[in-house]
Amino acid sequence: MPGRNPLALAEGALLDESLVPGSVAARRARISEPHVADLNALAEEVARVEGRRVPWFDPAGGGAAAPVLLLLQDPSRTAAHGSRLVSRHNNDVTAHHLHRHCTDAGLDVRATVVWNVVPWWVADPAVPAAERVGLVAAARRARPHLHRLLDLLPAARVVVLLGRHAQRGWDDAGIDAGGRAVLRAPHPSPNAYINTDRATGRPNRELLAETLADAARLGLASSR
């Protein structure tokens, strides 16, 4: 597979065993580090309770100390069956777009923690078709896990909801932001990235970049 996250590859951070041998194994060996230990205990509990493959939080990220939570809809195929980590460094285009715009905005990987409204890949073919549900139903099922996640992120003063499914999942969960700034941006997936926002007529990639810049301003100011 070619490098679909060229920025991470150039930084020597790409998670792909075929392109960077040992990269995934080395990162997974760190999943019990203190800043992600409780988060990954939650991920493993969700996997047991739901009977789903739930990727871990990336130990290269800020974990419990991160001022900015980046919340997407559900893990990618790469996260679910490749690296087994939800990471800006995964070898897919969505991760590349997110990592590139976070970097441009001044959001170092350690300033962010990345997760999903639904912690498992909704379309995972490893799950029998009769047991799969759509994103809306899965987000409803995952609400208790989202509430618990926020309890484990005391330093997160900014939440960025990436894409309409993450936004709807957050809204439907009735979460008390607790003083956090909640920002909304387009999803960084290849299809959404090239589209134009209907309400504003502006390219989604511009809105994504602008929102992440706002997240950096608010999140990094609150962490000083």
Image (cartoon, helix red, strand yellow):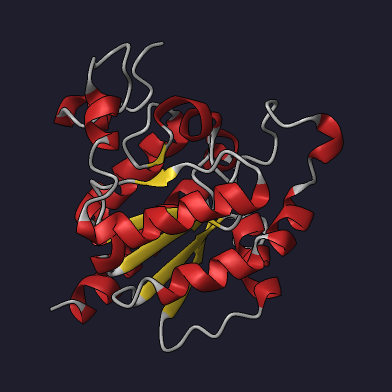
Identity of the residue drawn at 68% across and 26% down? 126
> Seen in the image, is 36 located left or right of residue 221?
right
Task: Work out which quarter of the rendered image holds the C terminus and state it.
Answer: bottom left
- Looking at the image, is 174 positioned above or below residue 43? below
- Residue 181 lies, in percent from the top left, at 42, 79
Q: Nearer the viewer, residue 196 or 124?
A: 124
Identity of the residue drawn at 67% across and 56% down? 198
- Looking at the image, is 138 positioned above or below residue 97? below
- Residue 219 lies, in percent from the top left, at 27, 73
Q: Which corner quadrant of the image does residue 93 belong to?
A: top left
- Residue 57 lies, in percent from the top left, at 37, 49
Identity of the residue drawn at 32% across and 46% down? 58
Q: Is residue 73 visible?
A: no
Q: Which corner quadrant of the image does residue 180 belong to?
A: bottom left
Q: Nearer the viewer, residue 64 or 109?
A: 64
Q: Which corner quadrant of the image does residue 166 belong to?
A: bottom right
Single out the residue that lies furthest toward the bottom: 179
Q: Is residue 132 visible?
A: yes
- Looking at the image, is 67 positioned above or below residue 41? below
| Picture mark count | 0
Q: Nearer the viewer, residue 23 or 5?
A: 23
Task: Work out which quarter of the rendered image holds the N terminus and state it.
Answer: top left
Single out the residue that lies furthest toward the left: 224
Identity of the residue drawn at 55% across and 66% down? 146
> Seen in the image, is 194 located left or right of residue 178?
right
- Residue 22 lies, in percent from the top left, at 22, 20
